[in-house]
Image: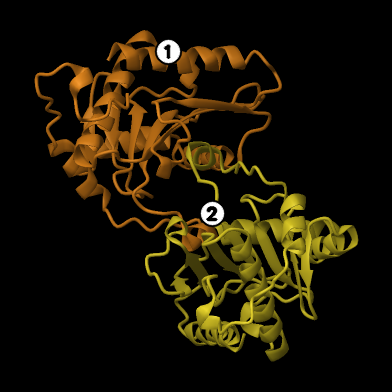
Chain colours: A orange, B yellow
Amino acid sequence: MKQVEEVVWGWRDRSLDLRKDQRLKYIQIFKNTGPTAGASLEHTHSQLIATPQVPSEVDAEITGMNEYHNRYGRCVLCDIIGQELREGVRLVAENRHFVCFAPFASRFPFETWIVPTEHQSDFGQIRAQQVQDLAAMFRSIVRKMTLMIKNIPYNMVLHTSPVNVQNDYGNYHWHLEILPRLTTIAGFELGTGYYINPTPPEIAAQALREIQEFYPLQKESELEVPRYV
Amino acid sequence: MKQVEEVVWGWRDRSLDLRKDQRLKYIQIFKNTGPTAGASLEHTHSQLIATPQVPSEVDAEITGMNEYHNRYGRCVLCDIIGQELREGVRLVAENRHFVCFAPFASRFPFETWIVPTEHQSDFGQIRAQQVQDLAAMFRSIVRKMTLMIKNIPYNMVLHTSPVNVQNDYGNYHWHLEILPRLTTIAGFELGTGYYINPTPPEIAAQALREIQEFYPLQKESELEVPRYV
């Protein structure tokens, strides 16, 4: 657990340091696990690439969040958290500072998002208690996925606000997406931008809620389940 | 050769027939070859999915082409064809009705686009001579790729104008994209929409120009090279 916390602190510290270079406009933190998900190293690792402009996908998400805010005067992710907590069917887990759910329009089977309950635009502003809770939740979800499907390939993608740009990103709500790669991005997906996902988010969330995060009383090093995190 | 022509006629006939259903707004024709590219059947096949709305990727491409036309009064793909024919470094092949090149901003190694030389918005309007030339060029490129890398996984994605929508799509220029899947769409690509491609299009085009499409004097059925098309 402590180790995952150190990793989250690492993401945050690198993010705060890199933005001192004014040329950098976005800091993409991500993690590829398993060859199908593009991992080129066998040992567990996460990565970071900073770009000199705001990437197109990030820009599209910001535009969407701003449009929602202009129309309703509220943050779309704050509203989604509220709805998922009320309805419960797509809810996976909840702790002091984070909510985890399978999003309504999941692109991948068992896609889950971890969202800070409090509205916060910039991942770099994460506080000590939040680091603890994010590490605990991320570790727990990945363990559950790994118990469900051994060596499950997945990407983790951290979505946060750009840096060193004049615009006000106050409407943005940072979050972490876990994207298992059990399906293939093929011709239809590349042509349309639509994803074919055979697993409804309600089924995915139920499975992730119900699976027991049980480990035999062994040293962690003896566990058969790979220690991804 | 005749067989590939029959396939192209099939795409065209299905496209013309499906659009009689006014609910359908886009007809996505594509082909997945190899498990890495999402093929679920072993025998060669192409696919078609019609959607009840214009997909986001198609919409973004139309918007881009319209913006270019508003600014310069010309079609961006017509301009690109002109530039690629002039410069030659990214040119792969040319026949009576089509130009094939590795696009400047290739997302994948050996990505190639086959574009009709004549400005044409709707693939459904393809004429008999064009069908012949498209089939010949598509077959030739895929054979060359297969000679270069045995069992190369690839997606073919046909980009064309929407159907049953009031808008004028006269600025759109249909084309066919061949996307070899030698790299993995991973966390960075999913987060940013940017693609990491280790093969410059100039190198890809040169390799595809230089490779000899030579086949031993055998029956096609005896060829070691898989008959993808």
User: Circle 2 sits on which residue?
Assistant: B181
The image position of residue A179, as x and y in percent, is 37, 41
* Parent chain of label 2: B
Residue farthest to the left, as pictured = A217
Location of residue B131 by image quarter: bottom right
Q: Residues within 10 Å of mark 2 (few under 14, many from 20)?
A: many
Q: What type is the residue that disc 2 sits on?
A: Arg
Image position of A30 with respect to B162: above or below: above
Image position of A171 with respect to A150: above or below: above
Q: On the rendered structure, is A94 left or right of B210?
A: left
Label 1 vs label 2, nearer the camera:
2
* Parent chain of label 1: A
Q: On the rendered structure, is B27 left or right of A76?
A: right
The image position of residue B29, as x and y in percent, is 52, 72
Image position of A139 with respect to A65: above or below: above
Residue farthest to the right, as pictured = B86
Q: Are marks 1 and 2 on the same chain?
A: no
CA–CA distance between discs 1 and 2?
35 Å
User: Circle 1 sits on which residue?
Assistant: A9
Q: What type is the residue that disc 1 sits on?
A: Trp
The image position of residue B34, as x and y in percent, is 46, 62
Q: On the rendered structure, is A148 left or right of B144?
A: left
Residue farthest to the front, as pictured = B217
Q: How many marks?
A: 2
Q: Which residue is drawn at 56% across and 88% down?
A: B6
Q: On the rendered structure, is A18 left or right of A156?
A: right
Q: Residue at x 63, y 60 (%)?
A: B148
The answer to whether residue A2 is visible is yes
The quadrant of the image that shows the N terminus of chain A is: top left
Q: Is mark 2 on a helix, strand or loop?
A: loop
Location of residue B57 by image quarter: bottom right
